[in-house]
Amino acid sequence: MKYLNIQDTDTTLTALLDEVAATQTEVVVTRDGIPVARIVPWQAKRTSTDRHPLRGMPIVIAEDFDESMPELWETLGE
């Protein structure tokens, strides 16, 4: 983690933001040695397709979907 005194932000803010984006590390901004803020890299929100990868895909049901499965019952011994 990097520390930056608030008096130095005016001259180095653009370079600092470029560094945060490139390295994906956070920077703590201090005033008189006391932390007052954090600059963290931006992380994009997850989209609904991340949580539901099959959303929007067509559903295909096999023609024999509801056919009996005698081999299953034989395996189960019933």
Image: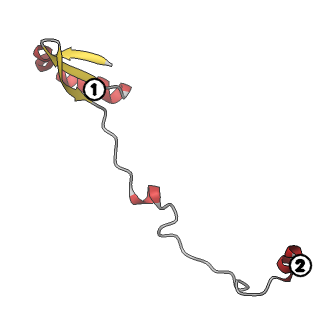
| Total tally of numbered discs in the picture | 2
Mark 1 secondary-structure assignment: helix
Residue placed most toward the observer, 29 or 54: 29
Q: Which mark identifies residue 18?
A: 1
Mark 2 secondary-structure assignment: helix
Image coords of residue 22 (percent x, y): 35, 27
Q: Is residue 39 above or below residue 33?
A: below
Q: Quadrant of residue 37?
A: top left
Image coords of residue 5 (percent x, y): 16, 14
Image coords of residue 61 (percent x, y): 64, 80
Q: Amino acid at mark 1?
A: Asp
Mark 1 in CB contact with mark 2 (< 8 angstroms): no
Q: Amino acid at mark 2?
A: Glu
Residue 62 located left or right of residue 17: right
Q: Quadrant of residue 74?
A: bottom right
Residue 26 located left or right of residue 33: right
Task: Work out which residue is located at the far front of the displayed protein and give it.
Answer: 78
Counting residues from the N terminus, which is met first, the one under dot 1 or under dot 2? 1
Residue placed most toward the observer, 63 or 31: 31
Residue placed most toward the observer, 14 or 52: 52
Q: Which residue is mark 2?
A: 74
Q: Quadrant of the N terminus?
A: top left
Q: Is residue 9 above or below residue 46?
A: above
The residue that appears at 46% across and 57% down in the rendered structure is 51
Q: Quadrant of the C terminus?
A: bottom right
